[in-house]
Structure formats: structure tokens, C-alpha cells
Image (spheres, rainbow, N blue to C red):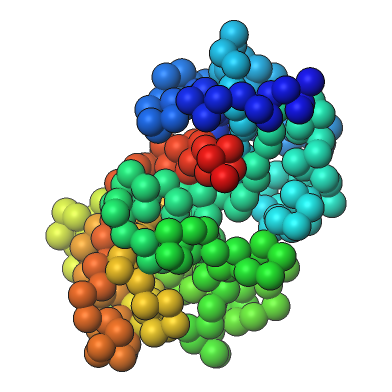
Amino acid sequence: MLATRMSDSSRSPVVGVDVGGTTLKAALVSPDREMIGRGQVPTDLRSQRALLDLLTRLVEQVRGDAEVAAVGFGLPSQVDQRHGRVIDSVNIPLADVDFVREMERRLDVRVAVDNDANVACLAESRMGAAEGAKHVVMLTLGTGVGGGLVLDGRVYRGAIGTGAELGHVTVDANGPPCHGRCRNRGCLEVMSSATAIMRHANDVASENRGGSLDSDLERGEDLDARYIIGQAQDGDREAVEALRRAGFYLGVGLASFVNIFNPEVVVIGGGASAAGELLIGPAREEMFRRALPATAMGVRVVVAELGNDAGVLGAACLALDMIEG
């Protein structure tokens, strides 16, 4: 039956699925990249089997009676693209599983899979903040820092598919230890993520006893990224300084990416991107200060536009690319 599905017209819709540690989102997407149906459910983290079962039910729900040509998945995972195999994941119980083969068996349709930051970058390059650009770098600033690359119009994944881990580029050789399985120090992930903003804010509070952030701590406020961004937008100078520090290190990393990949556009997404120019302004300034002038000339550093839809739209683009060859 799968062979029959594989011969379906390229004008058939696809399903894009964005897998997160909290929520699973799916959308039925036309070949023109219009969402024509959608659904979401809380992520089932009890086991790998439970998660795969839930993904199957969600796709079946969203596609309904439609004859879909393919399903694309964006996962917070390292994916061996040679075999469609998930090696390891962050925040979800998927590891050491032949994901493409398993989901094709369950859904009886072609399946494509990629890292969630890669699919977000693909979406932003096709219909978002970098639309029309063929060379795009994207960073997603959340609890960690995800990275995605579109080079010459195609997602770049490296030799086996686990490349573009841009969040694990060192920007401070003597910085804090990185998270999870990363054995490095001072990565972008610990210097410019939403988590890093909280650490910078606590440092600023310690340096300014009796100041605004120290007083906030005394009142029991949690100086997380959302709070700091809100305070900075209201004009709190110490909150602005915390964002400037995160932006400085972000700019250090961007200078290297610009020198290496020569992108037309750098897209900044994820929850911390809500800070806008309070974060991206210092990053852009530091990037231009450090990058090779000829390479940096004309590079745009912009905030992502697709928000929570980037994952499902990017996964759908992944599926559309596969059926279109």
C-alpha cells in the first residue's frame, strides 16, 4: 500500500508535525503551503512507545479522509539522515529508533524527519523572515540554542545529518559548562539562551545591591527571560544590561557563522527573540565589529516571523520537498 501512496500526485496535501517536550502540533498543509487543518495534544513522555502511539493518532486525526502524499516530522533530536534513524533526543523519550521506517509502517505513507531547528529554518527561508533568501542561518533561543542552516536553498545537515549544532559553538572558552551531553564550556547555549538571560540577570543583580533586579529578587520574583524582557521593554536599565550581555555573546557567535557560511539573512527565533532589538541590536553590533567586512556586508539579522507555526510549516515543507524530489 505504501508503494501506491508514494505514486500520489504532487498536488496532494501533506501533514507537518512539530514535536516538542510539552506539546505535539500537526497541520494538514496544501502544496501551496497553506494550512487547511490542524491539531495539537500534550506530549506523552511516559515512554517511547506511548509517544509513537500518540504521534500516530494525531496524524490520523489531522489528515482525516484526505489522501496525503507524505508526513514530515520536526523533532528535538539528532537524526541519522542516511537511515532516518533518531539517535538521541532532548526532552522527549526518542532514542535509537528507526523513526522513518516505524512511522511509515504505522501511517502507510512516506515519512521525512529532521531536527526541529532545521525545519524552522526551512520554513523561515520559504515563507517567513528570510523568504527569498537561499543562504540562511537560524538560531532558536529557548532553554537551549538550536541551529539551522539553509545553504543554496537546501537544508544543510552534514555527513550523517547531525550537523548545524550552532548552539554548541564556543563564545567564551572559560564560560560555564554546557548542558546535557555537551562536554564544552561557554557555548552559545549557556551564554545567549533564555536560560542564559536569567543567569546574566542574577549576575547584574549581584553587582548592583539595592538596585531594581536585586529588589525584585527580594520580593521573590523569578528573574527568568520572560520577566527580564518585560522589565527591559518597560525601561529597566538593569534588565536592559542583562539582555545586552546575552546579545554580546550572540554577536560573537554570529560573527563566526557569517565568516563561515556567508549568509544573506540570520534569523533569530525562539522565546528569547521576543526581546527584539534589545537583544538583537547588541548582537548585530558585535557581529559587524568582528566579522570580515566583505563577508558581513549586506547581512540582515532579523527576528523570526512564523512563531509557533514555524515547526509544522517547516515539517510540511520537508515532506513537500521529498515528494517533489
Q: Is residue 9 left or right of residue 302?
A: right
Residue 126 percent coordinates (x, y): 37, 47
Q: How many marks?
A: 0
Quadrant occupied by the C terminus: top right
Quadrant occupied by the N terminus: top right
Q: What residue is shown at x 30% (from left), y 51% (from top)?
A: 131
Give 159 or 94, whichever is nearer the viewer: 159
Residue 198: quarter of image: bottom left
Can I make out residue 161 in this image? yes
Name the outermost residue toward the top.
Answer: 65
Q: Is residue 302 left or right of residue 87?
A: left
Q: Is residue 74 left or right of residue 132?
A: right
Above or below, comparing residue 12 to residue 218 in the picture: above
Q: What residue is shown at x 44% (from left), y 30% (from top)?
A: 31
Q: What residue is shown at x 56% (from left), y 49% (from top)?
A: 116
Above or below, comparing residue 124 to residue 266 in the picture: above
Residue 259 percent coordinates (x, y): 39, 84
Give 142 or 75, whichever is nearer the viewer: 75
Residue 99: quarter of image: top right
Residue 53 percent coordinates (x, y): 77, 25
Give 155 or 97, whichever is nearer the viewer: 155
Can I make out residue 243 in this image? no
Name the outermost residue toward the left.
Answer: 235
Residue 50 percent coordinates (x, y): 79, 29
Q: What residue is shown at x 52% (from left), y 58% (from top)?
A: 155
